[in-house]
Amino acid sequence: MSEKITIEVAYALPEKQSLLELQVNKAATVEEAINTSGILVSHPEVDLSVLKVGIWSKTCKLDANLRDGDRIEIYRPLIADPKEVRKRRAEKAIQEGRADKVTGGRPNPRKKAED
């Protein structure tokens, strides 16, 4: 008989988080564990062919092997590109005079006084 390991499967929405602990066969893959967990029933919007998954914040493939104590995480797509958000925030700071136009850092008050 196969040895069992204990793992968790996590999926979070802004208003609802699911963290399920379960035991699976030692040879189970990430995809098998997700299917066994029942999380796809409580979150029918999860499409494993589209969403990325990971183990402890490191992305992995659905056929990855598991170890005892692993936490499988199902990642939702980003709403906004973090690089674009930072770029817009920096541009706004420059327009408002809160940032140096060249370096993007805070303006040096002594430099202005010297000019």
Image: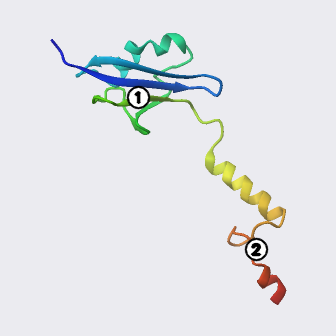
Q: Secondary structure at mark 2?
A: loop
Specify the quadrant that holds the C terminus: bottom right
Q: Which residue is the site of mark 1? A: 72
How far apart, in angstroms, are the residues tagged by discs 2 and 1?
A: 44 Å
Q: Please, is residue 46 above or below residue 107 in the view?
A: above
The image shows residue 59 at horizontal and vertical percentages of: 41, 37
Query: Residue 113 appears in which quarter of the rendering?
Result: bottom right
Is 24 displayed left or right of 57 in the figure?
left
Residue plotted at (40% across, 37% down): 56
Report whether residue 115 is seen.
no
Q: Is residue 106 left or right of residue 14?
A: right
Occupied quadrant, residue 29:
top left
- What crowding class fits label 1: few (fewer than 14 Cα within 10 Å), some (14-19), or many (20 or more)? many
Name the spot of residue 8 as percent of width and height, x first.
40, 25
Residue 19 visible to the viewer: yes
Residue type (three-letter) at the residue carrying disc 2: Pro
Indicate whether 4 appears above or below 101: above
Q: Find residue 54 and report its horizontal and vertical position in percent.
A: 41, 33
Q: Which mark is residue 107?
A: 2
Ranked by sequence position, the earlier of labels 2 and 1 is: 1
